[in-house]
Image (cartoon, grey):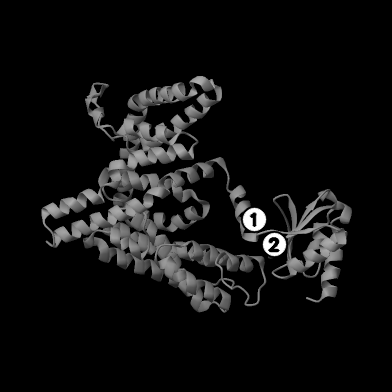
Amino acid sequence: MANAKIKQMSQKILEKVGGKENVISVTHCATRLRLVIKDKEIVDKKVINKIDGVMGVVEQSGQLQMILGPGTAAKVADEFGKLVGRKVGVEDEIKVRKEELKAKNSTPFKLFLRHISNIFIPLIPAFIGCGVIYGLAKILLNTECINKNTYYILYVIGKSIFMYMNIMVGINAAKEFGGSPALGGAIAGILTSPKLAKIVIGGENLIPGEGGIIAVLIAVILGAMLEKKLRKVMPSVIDLIATPTIVLLVIGLGSLYIFHPAGAFLSSGLSWLVNTAIEKGGIFVGAILSGTFLPLVMTGLHRVLTPIEVSLLDNTGLDLLRPILAMAGAGQVGAALAVYFKTKNKRLKKIIGSSLPVGMLGIGEPLMFGVTLPLGKPFLTACLGSMVGGAYISLTKVASIGIGLSGLPLTLLIPSNQVLNYIIATLLAYAGGFALTYITKWEDMAEDSDSEENSVINEVLNIK
């Protein structure tokens, strides 16, 4: 863009934002001129939006932002800085966009779900490793490749995650909710102790670990809340002794009389509900669960399913949800492949080419945020296409023996007699997403588009 046009654009923008006296600061990122304005009432956004070269005007993060496109934003910002006599700052667009998205999604409910997710994410490597070893042990035993003693050695290793899971969940939950990790582990230890079997409450002996993950989460979260309140009012001279003692006594007694039975009821109830829904609902429930999973991922609500999956594994040793949810990613792979064949946009083809392999391996964010969501309808057809695979999974009762994997790698956690059905379901989801996306009309991205959407996609995926 010629210097004359840059100067003209800068002068027009300055005029419509109220002159240099109304400008507090000038910064820019890859695609936007970002201004902090004194009096926003005198800014004429409608006229600014009509200035040649301005693609849009938005107000975000306390700034007036003009979308100018890659390259142009920096040039206009430099010229604008000269006009107002201020130093021009440079902002990292990806960092800013992430902060804006984080602020937008920081509702109390979503923050709570984020905490729950952060509790279980550190445990995923152990779930994967143990699941693979346990599954391998079952295969080797069934094919008579190992003896019973070797099987039990592998069994102990494969099931080791469940020996300390409650303690780790307690430690992680306390960290996430502002309590002491050691107290979180101790509270979880109360609910897991073998000596619970010697305690009689309500005429019956307690069963160690019966409250499951749910009881641990409830007890530790409440324990962290109580600890924070006590530390605010407790004299420092006795805080170290009094606070942990009170927390353990109050939450410990509450765990035995309230949280343990409540957790047992909720854990068994959730397991029964999920298993019954899938078994009795058949293909309908499988289709609905797989078809709605991508929207849950997009909003962050999928985090609520992790404790349910852990509870299923803890209570039954099998997870009927994981293979169904994996079909959502498979439907998206099929949809992205259809877009690849239909789009005329070379940049989009490049994005798909680099994202498809990881999508097949169960990492769907690049395809979702870089391809299907920006195009709109392909996101919907991906969801609908996945329902075919989800229905088949439910029909054949495919389950996994662990969590943490998705896509094709999930075959490592599928019992050997069900692997073929899982692969068939995955192929059906691929085909469903591909067919629906290919026959549906959707608006392609323009080849030479300098839209903010495309530039951000390229930066996020590091495509030059």
Mark 1: which amino acid? Val
Q: Is residue 162 visible from the viewing direction of this image?
A: yes
Q: Is residue 438 visible from the viewing direction of this image?
A: no
Mark 2: which amino acid? Cys
Label annotation for residue 29: 2
Disc 1 secondary structure class: helix
**Dividing the picture into quarters, in which one does residue 26 lie?**
bottom right
Q: Nearer the viewer, residue 198 or 277?
A: 198
Q: Which residue is mark 1?
A: 96
- Residue at 25 percent across and 51 percent down: it is 158
Q: Nearer the viewer, residue 381 or 114?
A: 114
Q: Nearer the viewer, residue 286 or 228?
A: 228
Place of residue 410 in the rendered image (x, y in percent of width and height, measured from the top left): 33, 61
Measure the alpha-carbon separation of dots 1 and 2.
9 Å
Judge the density around disc 2: few (<14), some (14-19), many (≥20) Cα neighbours within 10 Å.
Answer: many
Disc 2 secondary structure class: loop
- Residue at 82 percent across and 61 percent down: it is 81
